[in-house]
Image (spheres, grey):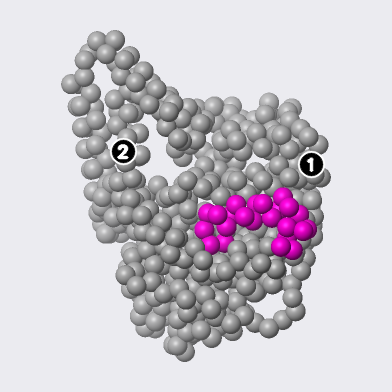
């Protein structure tokens, strides 16, 4: 298949951008119409069903009381319970039926069971090095305890043989990944939340097509929401013509399903099992500031070279194997590593699955906050916190830890921006320092603490990432690039405005009102 090229010579596969008319009359338009019809039908049935209930106020009150007691005894997040209580008390029947529908696992039960089997099947696929674990235990028993917890949730060993390179901008990651892709000999795995044609993806795609023609096993996974915004539904077929195997996670279909609530938000690139990339950077031009959407785009990423790359290989293969009858694991997890000097520090890549009971992403962040002695510095694009996470941030600050947050100065969406503002006053009162990046949008997901540990990955400080998305990250302890991460935080802070209690009083009224209203449904967003 020959590439189409735009006026700048960028490789393209799709036929231009989708206009409104084309979107309406496309397959996607038909699917959206069918989904709308089903949602309308559900609303109609819910409200019609309500007419058969006793009209007496006492009957409604009794029904509401039963549902409230049922909710209070359900093992769900306390903040989410409050939201559902509000919904059910305002709309008893409709709210109850909506809650039961969301809890029914319609549409994702099979995926949940399949992932559980794959996790169990591969739990010991990457053995834990006794040397690495014992040396971490001697260095810091608290850090070793965190490593044991992460391994409990899946096959996530800690490594002491992995070199880490930190990239303070998406442009830096992109330039390096192009060079590393050219060195691929056996396989290339990419798993990204967003893929959009343009300069960034075009350059990557040309290398992938050339490598596939050379016999390299090239595979791509991207999230189904791309079909709404960036790619046509037949894009996997077009990639296959280039020799690239491609799958869409949770593609949009004409059936209402709770599966749509769980998205693949991970960003993973693995090359030959010895090199891996992760971080906040998707494969679209705004992430390298080639196009401007919300001012200057600030993001970060890391590259791992060594044994820890195998963990990202396994994460990708588990997602790939969801619909495979005979999944392949062993031959990719035993690929030889590059020779080199032994790296300093410990590296532990991990994933977070929304379909199990382990909220790994949130608990890693909270553990860092609870063990911090001097500082915890954080970058996140969103701040929509549950009670536990907010308490952890406040408690760290109240016991004398310098807790600082860098958030966007130019938001990408009004709703999450207004919700973030609802946490400011409480955090500031406890001594948490908050800064907003004036040049534009911060998309980085970064924790760095006490010059000794940090996290770079895809996990935002919001309900979507902490509860509803498939996520990934790398926990780093005593690695050399931690100093660079802290230096980047300080450099970024120089371009920020500091949030103060006095300044909050001057916020736009509509923004404060929006956050005030949305606070009631924040866990559902």
The residue labelled by disc 1 is 402
- Whether residues under marks 2 and 1 lie with C-beta atoms below 8 angstroms apart, the answer is no
Q: Give how far across and how far down residue 301 sits, in percent.
A: 64, 63
Q: Give how far across and how far down residue 412 sits, in percent.
A: 55, 47
Depth order, front residue of 479/483 = 479
Which residue is found at the position 45% from the left and 35% from the top?
75
Looking at the picture, does residue 83 appear above or below residue 179? above
Which residue is found at the position 46% from the left and 36% from the top?
76
Q: Give how far across and how far down residue 220 sits, in percent.
A: 44, 71
Secondary structure predominantly adopted by residues drawn in magenta: helix
The quadrant in which residue 144 appears is: bottom right
Question: Does dot 1 land on a helix, a strand or a loop?
Answer: strand
Looking at the picture, does residue 212 appear above or below residue 265? below
Residue 343 part of the magenta segment: no
The residue labelled by disc 2 is 101
CA gap, disc 2 and disc 1? 43 Å
Which residue is found at the position 51% from the left and 31% from the top?
78
Residue 143 part of the magenta segment: yes
Which residue is found at the position 63% from the left and 35% from the top?
390
Depth order, front residue of 504/300 = 300
Can you tell which mark lies on residue 235?
none
In the figure, is residue 354 to the left or right of 426? left
How crowded is the residue under tag 1: few (<14 C-alpha within 10 Å), some, or many (20+)? some
In the figure, is residue 479 to the left or right of 308? right
Q: Give the quadrant of the N terminus.
A: bottom left
Dot 2 or dot 1: first in sequence order is 2
The quadrant in which residue 411 appears is: top right
Q: Give how far across and how far down residue 425 sits, in percent.
A: 68, 29
Question: Does the rendering let one see residue 508?
Answer: yes
Looking at the picture, does residue 237 appear above or below residue 75? below
How crowded is the residue under tag 2: few (<14 C-alpha within 10 Å), some, or many (20+)? few
Q: Which residues are magenta?
A: 134-156
């Amino acid at each position: 298949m020959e590439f189409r090229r735009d006026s700048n010579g960028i490789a393209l596969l799709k036929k231009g951008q989708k206009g409104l008319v084309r979107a309406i009359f496309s397959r996607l338009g038909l699917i959206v119409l069918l989904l709308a019809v089903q949602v309308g039908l559900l609303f109609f049935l819910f409200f019609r069903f309500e007419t058969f209930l006793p009209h007496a106020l006492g009957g409604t009150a009794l029904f509401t009381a039963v549902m409230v007691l049922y909710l209070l005894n359900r093992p769900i997040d306390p903040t989410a319970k409050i939201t559902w209580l509000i919904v059910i008390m305002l709309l008893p029947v409709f709210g109850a039926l909506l809650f039961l529908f969301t809890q029914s696992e319609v549409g994702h039960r099979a995926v949940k069971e399949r992932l559980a089997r794959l996790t169990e099947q591969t739990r010991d696929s990457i053995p834990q090095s006794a040397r690495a674990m014992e040396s971490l235990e001697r260095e810091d028993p608290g850090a070793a305890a965190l490593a044991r917890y992460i391994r409990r949730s899946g096959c996530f060993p800690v490594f002491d043989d992995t070199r880490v390179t930190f990239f303070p901008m998406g442009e830096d990651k992109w330039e390096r990944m192009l060079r590393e892709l050219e060195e691929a000999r056996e396989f290339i795995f990419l798993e990204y939340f967003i893929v959009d044609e343009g300069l960034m993806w075009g350059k990557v795609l040309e290398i992938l097509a050339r490598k596939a023609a050379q016999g390299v096993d090239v595979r791509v996974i991207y999230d189904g929401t791309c079909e709404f915004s960036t790619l046509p539904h037949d894009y996997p077929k077009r990639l296959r013509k280039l020799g690239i195997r491609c799958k869409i996670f949770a593609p949009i279909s004409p059936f209402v399903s709770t599966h749509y609530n769980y998205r693949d938000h991970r960003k993973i690139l693995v090359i030959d099992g010895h090199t891996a990339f992760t971080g906040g950077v998707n494969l679209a031009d705004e992430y390298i500031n080639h196009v401007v959407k919300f001012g200057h785009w600030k993001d970060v990423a890391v590259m791992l070279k060594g044994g820890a790359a195998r963990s990202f290989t396994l994460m990708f293969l588990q997602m790939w194997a969801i619909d495979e009858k005979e999944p392949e694991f062993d031959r990719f997890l035993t690929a030889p590593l590059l020779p080199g000097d032994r790296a300093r520090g410990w590296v532990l890549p991990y994933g977070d699955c929304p379909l199990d009971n382990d909220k790994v992403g949130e608990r890693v962040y909270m553990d860092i906050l609870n063990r911090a002695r001097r500082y915890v510095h954080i970058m996140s694009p969103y701040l929509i916190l549950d009670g536990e996470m907010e308490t952890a941030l406040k408690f760290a600050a109240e016991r004398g830890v310098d807790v600082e947050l860098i958030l966007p100065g130019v938001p990408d969406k009004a709703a999450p921006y207004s919700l973030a503002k609802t946490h400011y006053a409480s955090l500031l009162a406890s001594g948490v320092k908050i800064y907003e990046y004036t040049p534009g949008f911060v998309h980085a997901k970064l924790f760095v603490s006490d010059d000794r540990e940090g996290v770079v990955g895809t996990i935002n400080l919001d309900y979507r990432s902490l509860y509803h998305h498939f996520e990934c990250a790398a926990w780093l302890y005593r690695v050399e690039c931690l100093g660079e991460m802290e230096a980047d935080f300080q450099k970024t802070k120089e371009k920020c405005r500091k949030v103060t209690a006095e300044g909050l009083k001057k916020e736009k009224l509509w923004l404060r009102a929006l956050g005030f209203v949305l606070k009631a449904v924040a866990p559902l967003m």
